[in-house]
Image: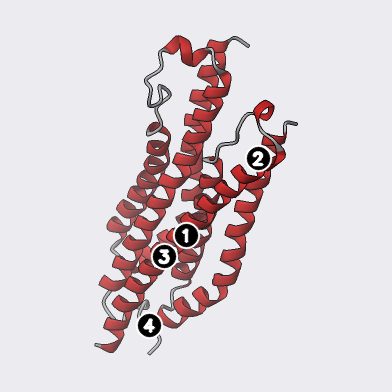
Amino acid sequence: MTDDLFLKLCYFGMGTLSIFLGWGVYRLLRRSFTEVTLTTAPAQASRFLVRLFLFGIVVSSFSGFLSVSMRGCSSRRYEEIVSDRAYILARVKDQASSSMLYLVDGLLASGFVVALLLSCKQPGRGVRPRV
Amino acid sequence: MASSQIFYIALALTAFGVAVGIYSMLRRSLKEILGSLVRLQGVSTFYERVLLLGLVLTSVGWALDASFGPDAESSFMDHLWDYADGLADVFVYTALFSGAFAVLLTVLISSLGRHRDG
């Protein structure tokens, strides 16, 4: 495998993986999130919120990937990057790590959205607490 | 397999174990808190999964961020110290995530409690 192909495979592979990571997290949470939004908001708003949730989670993960520059802090040239496979693997590791950590921010934000939805819900419509 | 890779995999596995361990300690009480506040089953499931995913992603994410010295220039103890540095990051940021989740839960409890009291 040529160095150029290795670099492209690593970069685009990690980019695709970060999108799938976000999508996988969305799939895990989709049902319970939809249940909450359907109970607390009108149907149209619920659909909007679920789509926004998908967008937010996938974008968080992908922006984590994008936030790590292959050029690094010392602004390496392309020839220096492509010839150093250890450096490429280290950057890919950073991208995977960053993607996961950005995703955590997205998860916390969605948790706050659910808390807001629940607190805005009027009493006596099924969500209210056990008094 | 190079010894740095073995330590790297061990760190990732330890981080995953730490996350699952913390989750299993907190899961039951989280379920009880949410069960006493809200009847809707989806809320409980949602927050349990957010907690699990958040803990796993935080700890494994910081474990992946760890760096190990080259095998030719590093001894066993060098790798062990790199492992300890990585594990320190895992614990610090897992604790920070747990704190953020506690704040989130406090907001939820106070807002639902306010409705209940009113």
B101 over A80 or under it: above or below: below
State the residue at coordinates (64%, 56%). B17
Q: Secondary structure at mark 4?
A: loop
Numbered mark located on residue B67 in the image: none
Earlier-in-chain disc, 1 versus 3:
1
Callout 3 and callout 2 share a chain? yes
Name the amino acid, label 2: His
**Front: mark 1 or 3:** 3
Numbered mark located on residue A129 in the image: 4
Numbered mark located on residue B50 in the image: 1
Callout 4 and callout 2 share a chain? no
Q: Which residue was labeled with disc 2?
A: B79
Quadrant housing residue B66 = top right
**Front: mark 3 or 2:** 2
Q: CA distance from mark 3 to mark 2?
A: 30 Å
Q: Is residue B76 left or right of residue A107?
A: right
Q: Secondary structure at mark 2?
A: helix
